[in-house]
Image (cartoon, rainbow, N blue to C red):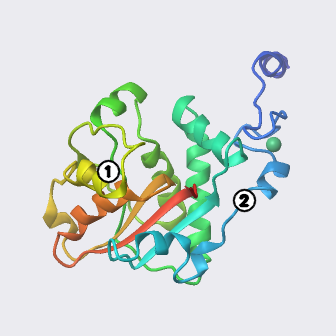
């Protein structure tokens, strides 16, 4: 009785709210309500060869598969969720997005058995500020659903690169080209790797990281993200 009263009081002051619409959630294990969940903007790309994400990487880096699960629009639901993940320590929402991505991959008809999931590594400085890498959080949800193990420390980011906003693609490429290191190449020898990030826009950073992975003999690469922000 007392603990129930305490819980009710706690909920009154700290209600557990839907990330999408702000409505109170009854299940504290959820991130969004059923209504918002139904309206998540799935792309459906996973089932289609030569989908818009595979086109982004075509001619730039050989990928066996690429996919983004949701459309990212300004002030949209997915942007709100990723914002919560990146700036408000809401790791639960990131894990949920990773699970959503994983379920779509398993049901795409194009799922392959990968050896490892590798989250796009974050700059050490940013990592220090935020305390966690959002791609790792997403990767953990993906790992839970697909049963493909997540490798965190093998590929690392080296140095801070300049802001990329006003640069052309070639300049951007030079800017990020040397910012990754594969620490134990032997661990990736002949492995199928699924590289994961939160949002794909130009794909330049994922491309740079992927190039380093593909230098290890016999590796094959898939690239996935939670969201796709078209320009
Ligand atoms: Zn909602």
Marks 1, 2: nearer the viewer: 2
Q: Which residue is mark 2?
A: 41
Q: Quadrant of the N terminus?
A: top right
Picture layout, residue 69 above or below residue 131: below
Return the residue nearer the eye: 27 or 172: 172
Q: CA distance from mark 1 to mark 2?
A: 29 Å
Circle 1 is placed at which residue position? 152
Q: Residues within 10 Å of mark 1 (few under 14, many from 20)?
A: some
Q: Earlier in the sequence, mark 1 or mark 2?
A: 2
Q: Is residue 102 visible?
A: yes
Residue 86 image offset from top left, x and y in percent: 52, 36
Residue for point 54% across, 30% down: 87
For the point 72% across and 46% down, which residue is it?
77
Q: Residue at x 35, y 54 (%)?
A: 205
Q: Nearer the viewer, residue 85 or 164?
A: 164
The x and y percentages for residue 217 are 16, 75
Q: Measuring 34% from the left and 62% from the top, which residue is drawn there? A: 207
Quadrant of the snapshot with the C terminus: bottom right
As drawn, 166 above or below 182: above
* In this rendering, position of residue 66 left or right of residue 31: left
Q: Nearer the viewer, residue 148 or 124?
A: 124
Total numbered circles? 2
Q: Quadrant of ligand 1?
A: top right
Image coordinates for residue 204, horizontal then vertical, percent = 37, 57
Tell me where residue 166 sits by quadrant.
top left
Mark 2, Cα crowd under 10 Å, few <14 / some 14-19 / many 20+, is: some
């Amino acid at each position: 009785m007392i603990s129930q009263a305490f819980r009710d009081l706690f909920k009154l002051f700290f209600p557990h709210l839907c990330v999408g619409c702000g409505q109170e959630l009854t299940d504290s294990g959820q991130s969004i309500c059923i209504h918002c969940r139904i309206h998540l903007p799935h792309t459906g790309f996973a089932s289609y060869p030569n989908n818009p994400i595979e086109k982004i990487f075509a001619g730039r880096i050989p990928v066996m598969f690429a996919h983004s699960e949701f459309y990212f629009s300004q002030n949209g639901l997915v942007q709100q969720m990723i914002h919560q993940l990146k700036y408000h320590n809401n790791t639960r929402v990131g894990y949920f997005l990773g699970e959503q991505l994983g379920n779509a991959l398993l049901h795409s008809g194009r799922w392959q058995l990968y050896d490892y999931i590798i989250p796009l590594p974050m700059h050490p400085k940013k990592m220090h500020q935020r305390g966690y890498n959002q791609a790792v959080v997403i990767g953990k949800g993906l790992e839970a659903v697909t049963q493909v193990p997540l490798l965190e420390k093998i590929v690392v980011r080296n140095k801070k690169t300049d802001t990329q906003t006003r640069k052309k693609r070639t300049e951007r490429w030079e800017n990020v080209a040397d910012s990754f290191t594969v620490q134990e190449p032997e661990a990736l020898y002949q492995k199928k790797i699924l590289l994961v990030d939160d949002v794909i826009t130009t794909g330049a950073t994922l491309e740079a990281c992927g190039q380093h992975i593909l230098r290890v003999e016999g590796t094959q690469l898939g690239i996935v993200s939670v969201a796709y922000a078209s320009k």
